[in-house]
Amino acid sequence: MPVISVKEIKERLRMKVTEKKSLVITPLPRREEALSADSVDLTLGTHFLLPQVPPLPFATLDQSELHSGQFRVHVPLGKYLVLPAHQTALGATLEYIKLPADLSGQILTKSSLARTFVAIETAPWIHPLYRGCLTLEIANVSNTPLLLHPGVKVGQLVLMRIENVDLDEEAKKRIGGKYLGPVYPGPPTFQISGTFCSRRASAETRSTSRAFDGSTSYSSSSFTSPRSAFAFSIIFSCNCPGTVS
């Protein structure tokens, strides 16, 4: 599949959203800075899924009743999240993507970020007709904690043209998929024996996700269990009690 050029990217971005070949990447306020010869720079969003501390004793790929082992965090623009060394998190792009039926894509880590031994991936491929923000698997494989600032460039979207696609026929098909239309990072969903099986977040996870609305400072006492409180104290860098940096 040939990689499309910046000229074609611009042409597709200018098309009306109802056109069959249109490409949507929004917001893209500094379009010229974001575009390179063969890719589009994407930035880190403000929502994350972080692993519980201490972690679950094991993970499974075939049961829906287990807790997700993750809790949601909102980090406002201008703040940062501390990702400890050798730890992982799920994030999402700030940009919402809409691909036409004749384009697929892949996210590559920005080279400057990769040289700090941080890997940004979206597993493993962006299929045609995808809609939504892209969930990013963020891995800090270095020996040093990393500050993640929402709004910074973290990846490059490379788009490839699929040949011999009947756009009229594709337009008649119903758009579907396990991860269609997300705006936040999502936990894994597995398909077993023809049914979709999502690992459910516990009441503790839901309570934790409500805490970080970006408008109030919270201390570890805001959490519903010692495990969540401990995770808060480990993962965030605080200038003073009750603030998220």
Image (spheres, helix red, strand yellow):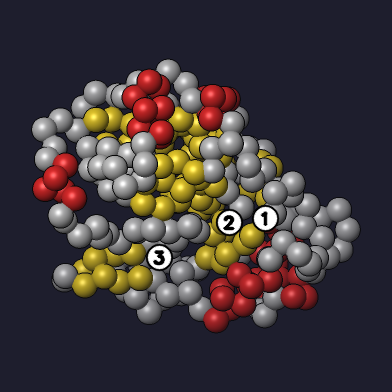
Is any part of residue 55 visible from this angle? no
Residue at mark 1: 75
Name which residue type carries label 3: Ala
Residue at 81%, 55% in the rendered image: 238
User: Looking at the image, which is closer to me, 219 or 40?
Assistant: 40
Q: Is residue 163 left or right of residue 242?
A: left
> Quick check: marks 1 and 2 in contact, CB under 8 Å?
yes
Residue at mark 2: 47
Label 2 SS: strand
Give how far apart the Cα atoms at labels 1 and 2 are: 6 Å
Residue 112, quarter of the rendered image? top right
Label 3 SS: loop
**Residue 203 percent location from the top left of the image:** 55, 81
Tag 3: Cα neighbours inside 10 Å, few (<14), some, or many (≥20)? Answer: few
> Quick check: marks 1 and 3 in contact, CB under 8 Å?
no
Viewer-side label of 2, 3: 2
Q: Is residue 93 left or right of residue 235?
A: left
